[in-house]
Image (tube, rainbow, N blue to C red):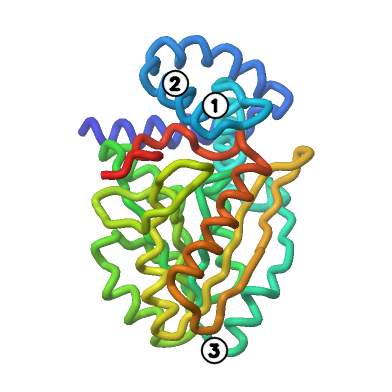
Amino acid sequence: MMSRLTTIFLSLLSRILIWWPRQKQQHIFEIIWPVFRFFRKSEIKRVKKHLHRANFVPKPQAKQVYGDLFYNAWDSLRYLHKPSALPVIMRQAELLSNELAQQRPVVAISIHSGAFEILHRALTNFGVPVHLVQAMNFPAGMNQWLQKMRFHPLIQPHSPAQSPQILRKLFEKPQILALMVDQARDVRGNEVNLLGNPSYLWLRLALKAQEMGASLVLFRTFRQNGQHIISFEKVFNNPQNTQDLVSEITASVKQWIVENPTQWTWNYPRLWNLM
């Protein structure tokens, strides 16, 4: 009963928010920030620690990080409700479409930066099934609401435990496997050095798919001058040494974070915490 009430509340709230004037967003953030800061002290302390370890000059402030997370999440909400309500610029989409045209399955790799909820919905523009690996670690009511919000007939959600089944489906015909490789729970990652600190990127499923013949396409989204850009950046479609490939992907992820440091989700608990 409680989970259903939560789902109904979030559905109503989201419908109100998508019609809220954009120019009022900053006012709302300035109101809720002191409240959030009071109740999430430990999380904000962790974010400050992460920012310090990354050694940026100048160093972004925690408030800037949460502000961008707030604005990007709000725009994601608008896009999931009605894609036409949030114009998105797609750059170099042919990098992915060319691989599908050559009958190659594609693993689309990105990170939790920018309005990242728009990434996988945008992949449906290529007209093939999109297998989305996601871990739903929220309360039941929020999980149900997110599933409803993210629904699209071409998007097929999977848990990380379903990896063998996902790979079989991926190679039945050219399809897309969508992975966010900077966050995961309860699975083994690839140890890398990210921004000068030991960390994990979760690339094992992507590497296995490439070993079987899939292409890897790196893509990202970021907000720039009030616009949201989805940029397809690199393609790996030939066999390559595993460590070299991990190093190249890590270098791209580092570049994305450095270019838009406040748009990455620094509040992830396992960041730079090798288990």
Q: Quadrant of residue 29?
A: top right
Q: Secondary structure at mark 2?
A: helix
Sequence order check: which comes first, mark 2 or mark 3? Answer: 2
Callout in the foreground (2, 3): 2
Q: Is residue 238 visible?
A: yes
Callout in the foreground (2, 1): 2
Q: Residue at x 45, y 85 (%)?
A: 213
Circle 3 Cα neighbour tier, 10 Å, few/some/many (<14 / 14–19 / ≥20): some
Q: Residue at x 33, y 73 (%)?
A: 166
The residues bearing labels 2 and 1 have C-alpha atoms spaced at a distance of: 9 Å
Residue 119 percent coordinates (x, y): 56, 56
Residues under numbered marks 2 and 1 in contact, where contact means CB atoms less than 8 Å apart:
yes
Q: Which residue is mark 2?
A: 44
Residue 106 percent coordinates (x, y): 51, 76
Amino acid type at image mark 1: Tyr
Disc marking residue 66:
1
Q: Which residue is mark 3?
A: 103
Looking at the rendered image, the quarter that the N terminus falls into is: top left
Residue 80 percent coordinates (x, y): 55, 49
